[in-house]
Image (spheres, rainbow, N blue to C red):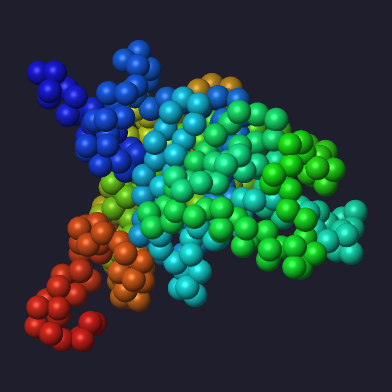
């Protein structure tokens, strides 16, 4: 019985985090029994994870995993993110995109005006260490910790140095090693005080999603995931290939699970999966709106879009192949293309014939 219980817990953790079964068992064995299955962050840790989730933007292209994160290790005071080694369609690595989006740098003085944002990246994000094991990020004046890792990348210091050299050549001043907030960073928070407060108050939501990043590829059967935020209202859109029925019940059940979920409750559900009037040529959308405990700022809307037969996603399938997506996952989310590809591969025909 204990073996079965441990195995079920490891399987659940695998679904939520993307860790392998062996990694999940090891993680669970290292955590105190009294701690929640997936520990929630708090304070500055909440905020840093929220900012990383928003500005990492691994949803800008097709990577090996839907949001560019293969797995996460969520501890109560830190989180480790395993980023995909994939590149964009223009040959730009995801990790380089991450550095651009996260690391702050002051604009050249000639480009600064009272009406313009004077800092690139995320004001307040700091590098505490760049080593072979990963890039350690924090927020100025805090002990918050997010560690970025990526298979095949062991020299994060060189990546950071390259980013610094590029910025300085154009007159920017990197500030990710400063102990305190720089004047432009302080000015940003003062000028956008209301927005900064809203982001901080609702940071539990994107932090919780980041800690459960595995759901986007282990439970969802969407081939494409996009997300965005307006103040503290988050939107996630999951696109499903024609003929693939959205697994919205399972996805929502995992988000709202009392032991593994985020304390979310379903406020509204609109489902078009079996709508008798639906024309298969056109898209259908099932929408779920969720909120946290009473009085908790922040809301989540998940859109499960079933693409109509008008959609020819063959190019997307090839892009996911190039990105290194798992063939088993591809067979689940794009079964028609995958079956055709395997058939063509066996017969030696060019792909797509």
* Residue 67 seen in the figure: no
Q: Residue furthest top?
A: 34
Q: Residue at x 58, y 50 (%)?
A: 55
Q: Quadrant of residue 162?
A: bottom right
The residue located at (70%, 41%) in the rendering is: 124
Depth order, front residue of 342/119: 119
Q: How many marks?
A: 0
Tell me what residue is drawn at x 34 percent, y 39 percent: 17
Please state which of residues 260 and 237 is positioned toward the viewer in this rendering: 260
In the rendered image, residue 16, in percent from the top left (x then y), is placed at: 33, 37
**With respect to residue 184, does 312 lie above or below?**
below
Is residue 128 at least partly visible in the picture?
A: yes
- x and y percentages locating residue 220 in the rendered image: 31, 48
Q: Taking 194 as reference, is 258 above or below it?
A: above
Indicate whether 76 appears above or below 67: above
The image shows residue 67 at horizontal and vertical percentages of 43, 53
Quadrant housing the C terminus:
bottom left
Compared across the picture, whether 168 is left or right of 146 comes to right
Q: Quadrant of the N terminus?
A: top left
Residue at x 24%, y 82% (from the top left corner): 352
Horizontal arrangement in the rendering, residue 351 relative to residue 299 (left or right): left
In x, y percent, where is residue 91?
A: 47, 73
């Amino acid at each position: 019985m204990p073996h079965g219980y441990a195995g079920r817990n490891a399987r659940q953790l695998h679904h939520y985090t993307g860790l392998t079964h062996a990694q999940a068992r090891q993680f669970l064995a290292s955590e105190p029994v009294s701690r929640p299955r997936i520990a929630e962050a708090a304070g500055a840790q909440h905020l840093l994870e929220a900012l990383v989730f928003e500005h990492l933007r691994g949803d800008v292209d097709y990577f090996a995993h839907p949001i560019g994160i293969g797995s996460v290790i969520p501890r109560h005071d830190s989180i480790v993110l395993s980023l995909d080694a994939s590149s964009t369609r223009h040959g730009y690595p995801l990790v380089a995109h991450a550095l651009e989006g996260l690391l702050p740098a002051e604009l050249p003085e000639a480009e600064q005006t009272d009406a313009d944002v004077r800092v690139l990246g995320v004001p307040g994000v700091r590098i505490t260490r760049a080593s072979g094991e990963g890039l350690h990020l924090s927020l100025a004046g805090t002990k918050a910790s997010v560690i970025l890792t990526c298979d095949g990348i062991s020299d994060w210091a060189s990546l950071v140095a390259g980013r610094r050299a590029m910025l300085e050549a154009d007159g920017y001043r990197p500030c990710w090693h400063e102990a305190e907030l720089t004047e432009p960073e302080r000015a940003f928070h003062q000028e956008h005080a209301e927005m900064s407060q809203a982001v901080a108050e609702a940071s539990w939501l994107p932090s919780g999603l980041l800690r459960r990043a595995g759901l986007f590829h282990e439970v969802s059967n969407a081939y494409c995931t996009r997300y965005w935020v307006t103040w503290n209202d988050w939107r996630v859109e999951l696109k499903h290939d024609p003929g693939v029925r959205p697994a919205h019940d399972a996805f929502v059940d995992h988000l709202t699970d009392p032991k593994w979920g985020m304390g979310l409750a379903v406020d509204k559900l609109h489902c078009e999966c079996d709508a008798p009037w639906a024309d298969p040529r056109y898209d259908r959308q099932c929408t779920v709106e969720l909120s946290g405990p009473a009085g908790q700022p922040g809301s989540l809307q998940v859109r499960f879009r079933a693409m109509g037969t008008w959609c020819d996603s063959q190019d997307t399938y090839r892009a996911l192949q190039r990105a290194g997506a798992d063939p088993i996952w591809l067979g689940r989310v794009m079964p028609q293309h995958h079956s055709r590809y395997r058939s063509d591969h066996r017969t030696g025909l060019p792909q797509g014939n």
